[in-house]
Amino acid sequence: MIKRIITLSSLLFLCLALSACGLNNKNTNSDSLAKASDPKLILFYSNSCPHCKIVEQYMGENNIQAKSGIVLKEVSGDKSAAQDLVAKAAKCNISQSDLGVPLLWNDGKCFVGDKDIVAFFGEQYK
């Protein structure tokens, strides 16, 4: 588990470093368009994460994806998804050293770990 967190942290740091060049080139219209199309409910996960599998099983058993319109983002093999995870976590004041998956983004609020995410789904999508 610690090795996976270190590897994920390294990947996320690399993604941030590589994307830093484009951060100063902002276009107000494209930013507005991106915010308008930004999904309100996103689950960040990794295929190798056992806690993510618990969330995935709960979602399947309770048809959460169809009920919620959730967007799933696998971060270990997708640089863009990893960058989005870092950005969303930062908005929730989660430091890179504490960052891990599964992480659920709910329109500005983060839920971390299988227990908190399953509890959220249980309350919202009974």
Image (tube, rainbow, N blue to C red):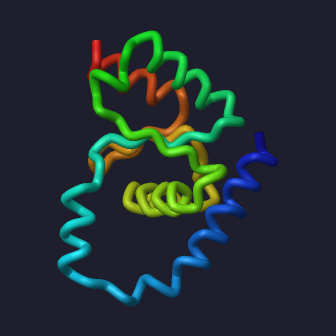
74 lies above or below 78: above
The part of the image, by quadrant, that contains residue 72 is top left
Please give left or right for residue 16 compared with residue 26 in the image: right
115 lies above or below 22: above
- For the N terminus, the quadrant is top right
Residue 80, horizontal then vertical, whole percent? 51, 61
- Tell me which residue sits at (65%, 50%) in the image: 76
Foreground of the two, 123 or 63: 63
The part of the image, by quadrant, that contains residue 82 is bottom right
- For the C terminus, the quadrant is top left
For the image shown, how many numbered marks are present on the structure?
0
Farthest-out residue, right: 3
The part of the image, by quadrant, that contains residue 119 is top left
Please give left or right for residue 34 compared with residue 70 in the image: left
- Tell me which residue sits at (65%, 52%) in the image: 77
- Tell me which residue sits at (35%, 35%) in the image: 70
Foreground of the two, 89 or 19: 19
Residue 94, horizontal then vertical, whole percent? 49, 56
5 lies above or below 72: below
- Tell me which residue sits at (18%, 78%) in the image: 29
Foreground of the two, 58 or 72: 72
Residue 16, horizontal then vertical, whole percent? 57, 72
